[in-house]
Amino acid sequence: MHNQAMEPQTFIFIRRSGCGKGTQVELLQEHIKKQDNKRYIFYIETGERFRQFIKEHSLSSRLAAEIYKTGNRQPDFIAVWMWSHLLVERMTGEEHVIFDGTPRSPQEAQIIDTAIDFYGRQRPQVIYLNISRETSKARMIARRRMDDVNAEEVERGLNWFESDVLPAVEYFRKHPKYNFIELDGSQPVEAVQQELLSKAFG
C-alpha cells in the first residue's frame, strides 16, 4: 500500500458518549496519512460544529441551544445541514472523508446514504464503537465536573441513543454497500485500534 496511492476512503463513526471515539479517529487519521500523504482528509465532526453553532445569535441557533440545554436530540434537518452544506461547498472527490458524530437517526442515515451515492464513494465503512449503557453513563458522569452533572439529562441522552441512534446503526449493519465494523469500545485503546485497522484495511 505504501507504493500505490490509496483510493479515497470514507468512514462514518458512530458511538455512545464516553467510548473514546475521538482518540480512535485521531489514530485512524495518522494511519491514513502514513499510507497516503497526498490526499487531504476531510474531517466532518458534527459535535464540535454544533457547539459553535449554538453560541451564535440567529433564530436557528437560539432554538437549537434551547433543545441542547434539555439534553434532547436536535431535529434531523439541523443535523443534516451541519454536514451536508460542507460537502456541497468543499468536496472535490479526491479526498478521504471521515464523518464523526453522525448520523443520529435512521432518517439521517438514509440521507447520508444518498450523499454517498451522489459523490460515488466506493466501499464506505461504518465504525460502530460499542460500549454498554452502564459504562457510557459512568464515563459521562466521570468526565464532567460534579456540580455539572444533571442525572435526568444524562438519562435522556442515553435513552435517545437507544431509541434513535441504534436504528441508524442497524440500517448500516444490514446495508450491503457498507463495510460495517463493530468494535468493543471497552477494550484498551491499542486493542481497539488494532482491530479497527485490520478490519478496515486488512
Image (spheres, helix red, strand yellow):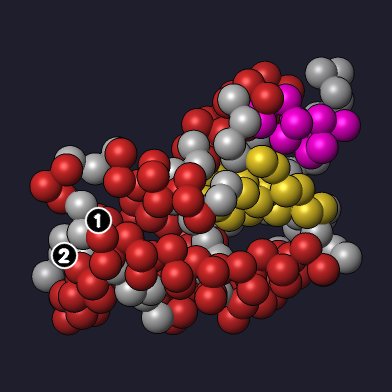
Say what secondary structure mark 1 lies in. helix
* Image quarter of residue 30: top right
Q: Main secondary structure of the magenta part?
A: helix
Residue at the spot x=67%, y=19% of the render?
Answer: 34
Q: Which residues are magenta?
A: 192-202
Furthest residue in direction front, as rendered: 134
Relative image position of residue 195 (x, y in whole percent): 75, 31
Give the vertical position of 167 relative to 181 (above or below).
below
Looking at the figure, which quarter contains the C terminus?
top right
Q: Is residue 7 left or right of residue 111?
A: right
Residue occupied by mark 1: 52
Distance Cα–Cα, label 2 vs label 1 = 7 Å
Q: Nearer the viewer, residue 180 or 160?
A: 160
Q: Report if residue 125 is visible in the image.
A: no
Is 81 contained in the magenta span? Answer: no
Q: Is residue 116 above or below residue 29?
A: below
Q: For the residue carrying disc 2, how many other residues have a C-alpha within 10 Å: few (<14), some (14-19), or many (20+)?
A: few
Q: Quadrant of residue 107?
A: bottom right
Q: Name the spot of residue 7 as percent of width and height, x first.
A: 80, 40
Front in this rendered view, residue 141 or 85: 141
Label 2 with label 1: CB-CB less than 8 Å: yes
The image shows residue 198 at horizontal and vertical percentages of 81, 30
The residue singled out by tag 2 in the image is 56
Q: Residue at x 61, y 77 (%)?
A: 106
**Amino acid tagged 1:** Gln
* Residue 194 magenta-highlighted: yes
